[in-house]
Image (cartoon, rainbow, N blue to C red):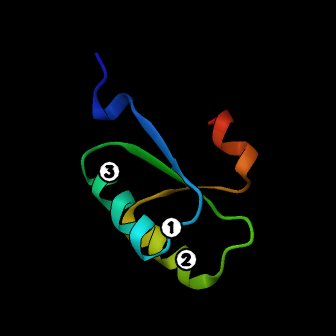
C-alpha cells in the first residue's frame, strides 16, 4: 500500500505555484524534493519555507 510517508515527489523549480503544491505535499508527509541548480535566493527561500528537500541537480532526483 502506498502511504504519504513512502511517497517521494520531485519539483523542478518551486515558484509560487510549485512551492504551494510542495508545501501541501510536505504537510501531508510526502517527501518532496526540489532542484536547486541555477535557482535564486527567492526560490531557495520559498522551498525552505515550504519544507522541501533540496537536491543540487536534476539528475540527482532519480538517485534519492
Q: Answer above or below: position of 33 versus 37.
A: above
Q: In the rendered image, which residue does mark 1 sit on?
A: 14
Where residue 25 appears, as percent x and y from the top left, is 32, 51
Q: Are marks 1 and 2 in contact (CB under 8 Å)?
A: yes
The local crowd at label 3, few if under 14, some if 14 to 19, many if 20 or more residues have their Cα within 10 Å, is many
Rendered residue at 40%/70% (across/down): 17
**Would you identify the image quadrant in which residue 37 lies?**
bottom right
Q: In the rendered image, which residue does mark 2 sit on?
A: 43
Q: Earlier in the sequence, mark 2 or mark 3?
A: 3
Q: Nearer the viewer, residue 29 or 21?
A: 21
Q: Which numbered disc covers residue 50?
A: none
Q: Earlier in the sequence, mark 1 or mark 2?
A: 1
Where residue 64 appears, as percent x and y from the top left, is 61, 36
Where residue 42 appears, as percent x and y from the top left, is 54, 84
Q: Give the distance between the C-alpha atoms of the residues marked 2 and 3, in whole angstroms.
A: 17 Å
Q: Answer above or below: position of 41 versus 48.
A: below
Q: In the rendered image, which residue does mark 3 sit on?
A: 25
Amino acid at each position: 500500500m502506498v502511504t504519504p510517508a513512502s511517497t517521494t515527489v520531485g519539483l523542478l523549480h518551486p515558484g509560487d505555484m510549485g512551492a504551494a503544491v510542495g508545501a501541501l505535499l510536505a504537510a501531508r508527509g510526502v517527501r518532496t524534493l526540489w532542484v536547486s541548480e541555477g535557482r535564486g535566493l527567492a526560490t531557495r527561500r520559498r522551498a525552505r519555507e515550504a519544507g522541501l528537500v533540496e537536491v543540487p541537480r536534476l539528475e540527482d532526483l532519480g538517485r534519492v
